[in-house]
Image: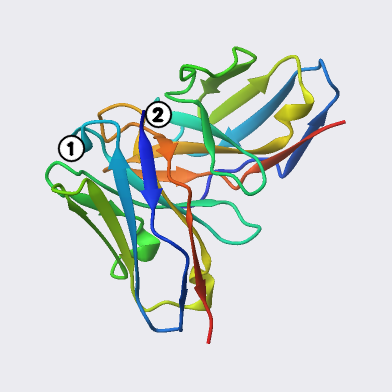
Amino acid sequence: QSALTQPASVSGSPGQSITISCTGTSSDVGGYNYVSWYQQHPGKAPKLMIYDVSNRPSGVSNRFSGSKSGNTASLTISGLQAEDEADYYCSSYTGSSSWVFGGGAKLTVL
Amino acid sequence: QVQLVQSGAEVKKPGASVKVSCKASGYTFTSYYMHWVRQAPGQGLEWMGIINPSGGGTSYAQKLQGRVTMTRDTSTSTVYMELSSLRSEDTAVYYCARGYYDSRTSAPAFWGQGTLVTVSS
């Protein structure tokens, strides 16, 4: 199972909105509504930000939203803040109780 | 609250095996699947496999088939991940992570603190 494709880096200014894409295939992203997104700060464990394409766990800011179209999922962060600077990973169910992660995208807040 | 406490850092020689534990508390252990995910230094997340603590059923990443074994002990609410025939590329932080809801299709949501495994001669 190949890793999902994410841009290596994205950037934005405080207050702006950014979108991170996550491209897979019909065997993963396109085939199931089980895409999740994680935020990871240096030296910390990942934090679940979005599950099942567009659902936010309790406690996650509504500035974070997720969507999917075909084989590509997207994470949008609105009202960008300095503390949003982190690595972001997508993940998708691939069937038969298996999962795959994306390569990660580094978000820089300018 | 959900807590996952992992065993401490390990240093192993190439060819050896390592067994990492993950003790769960704060919820019904047998109701939620547990994932294992690793992260090599400076690299991304890699999904390793999943175990159903209720029946012990497992599913492993194809890349690790034959080298990884996940087990559980319901009496102590602990899951284990054993990786054999270690090579330098296995040097990574290993995480256990519980599913957000009680289904095999639930994404990893609650993470342990991570266990650094270093493979070096």
Q: Which residue sits at x=31%, y=26%?
A: B101
Residue at image coords 49%, 18%? A56
Mark 1 lies on residue? B30
Q: Looking at numbered disc 2 in the image, what kind of residue is underneath it?
A: Tyr
Q: Position of residue A91 (x, y in %)?
A: 48, 38
- Above or below: residue B80 compared with residue A109: below
State the residue position of label 2: A34
Q: Is residue A52 visible?
A: yes
User: Where residue B41 sits in the image (x, y, percent)?
Assistant: 62, 61
For mark 2, give the secondary structure. Answer: loop
Q: Quadrant of residue B70?
A: bottom left
Answer with left or right where residue B108 lies relative to residue B53: right
Q: Which residue occupies the foreground of this view, A100 or B113?
A: B113
Q: Amino acid at mark 1?
A: Thr
In the picture as drawn, the residue positioned furthest to the bottom comes out as: B121
The residue under the point 46% across, 20% down is A57
- Closest to the camera, between mark 1 and mark 2, is 1
Q: Identify which residue is drawn at 19% across, 44% down.
A: B53
